[in-house]
Image (tube, rainbow, N blue to C red):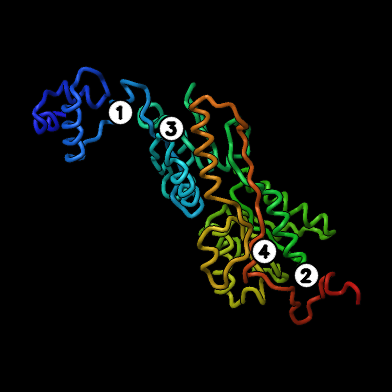
Amino acid sequence: MSDVARTAGVSVATVSKVVNGRYGVAEATVERVQQVIRQLGYEASLGAQSLRSHRTNVLGILVAEFEPFSTELLKGASKEVAGTGYQLLAYSGGDGGGAAIGWERRSLARLSGTLIDGAVIVTPTVVETKPGFHVVAVDPHTGPSGLPTVDSDNFAGAVLATEYLLSLGHRRIGHISGRPDLESARLREAGFRKAMADAGVPVDERLVRVGGFRIESTAGTAAELLALPDRPTAIFAGNDLSAISTMDVARSMGLTVPDDLSVIGFDNIPESALVDPPLTTIMQPLQRMGAEALRLLVDLIAGVERDTHIRLPTELVVRASCGPYRPGPGAPLSRAATAGG
């Protein structure tokens, strides 16, 4: 402020009045001070602003790490924030591995009330909020929280994925599940089991394993599944990163996708269309989820009464990573193949 005052030829007190919108400054002086502020790239301290007004007009979107899922959510939130009067702060509070316990609590302790007026938290597991500080959760944990939430229809999407593999004649279908602490992972496994049960196909529990939604953790799980003497002919992976990892492992083991193994994912991140072969997946509208979460947060801060749980639909996106069941030498035909003679 001293630099602005010196350059504009006014007192620091006058600059303070202009910055804080107080009366008692001539219009010409206000214009001159604002011009100098723009020239010098001056911006008021968010911390100082919050001490004076208890508001920063900044919203946070907090993630454990910036990976494809959270990046797509961020794109949607950043588009939605335009015209709201708020700015958006993207903050990574994890340890780079995406699994640091309590990162949400630490992030909120650092940012809430001093740098941000409210937060969208992506895939939270532990959340404790201050009274009057609004938080919206995207794809939250499995325990009770009561937080305003935005998610997609994970159960219906998993049913779609499994039914598609069944329609191709596959019966030995594996499922690589996501993080056990997330509701989305639980619902996707439940949807897989429901579709298998409805088709009268028993689930081989050896083919259901935890992958954790990550490329690194999925690789070992996929290798174990594909090394089985009676390996699965198709795998429903808990998310696209897990599906891409599974295809990489299959390729390294000499298997061809989709001739030897069909793979379907979940999310429809941009990378899913770029792999070889392009990944068949379940689309959840990630950018719309980010936009809806941001709008819900703005409304909550403004005191607008509305539904605090938004669930968006999912849909099947067919590409090239799934094919019809093809029995290997000496393998029994699937029930679909033998039906009708």
Which residue is denoted by mark 1 in the rendering?
47
Q: Earlier in the sequence, mark 1 or mark 2?
A: 1
Q: Please indicate, yes or no, whether residue 216 appears anywhere in the rendered image.
A: yes
C-alpha distance separating marks 2 and 4: 13 Å
Query: Which-is-in-front pick, marks 2 and 4?
Result: 2
The image quadrant of residue 86 is top left
Q: Which mark is residue 169?
A: 2
Q: Is residue 12 depicted above or below 159 in this figure?
A: above
Q: Which percent across, then down, holds residue 143?
A: 62, 35
Q: Which residue is mark 3?
A: 108
Does 301 sit left or right of 27 as displayed? right
Front residue (pair 17, 128): 17
Q: Which mark is residue 301?
A: none
Answer with mark 4 or mark 1, whichever residue precedes in sequence.
1
Q: Quadrant of residue 339?
A: bottom right
* Residue at x 81%, y 59% (from the top left corner): 202
Crowd around label 4: few <14 · some 14–19 · many ≥20 (10 Å) = many
Q: Residue at x 74, y 77 (%)?
A: 326
Above or below, 223 relative to 211: below
Mark 4 → mark 3, Cα distance in angstroms:
38 Å
Q: Earlier in the sequence, mark 2 or mark 4?
A: 2
Query: Which residue occupies 49% across, 32% down?
Result: 298
**Which amino acid lies under the numbered mark 2 shown in the image of this protein?**
Gly
| Tags 2 and 4 touching, CB below 8 Å | no
Give the Cα separation between the discs numbered 3 and 1: 15 Å
Label 2 SS: loop
Q: Are marks 1 and 2 in contact (CB under 8 Å)?
A: no
Q: Secondary structure at mark 1?
A: helix
Q: Position of residue 108 (x, y in %)?
A: 43, 32
Mark number, residue 235: 4
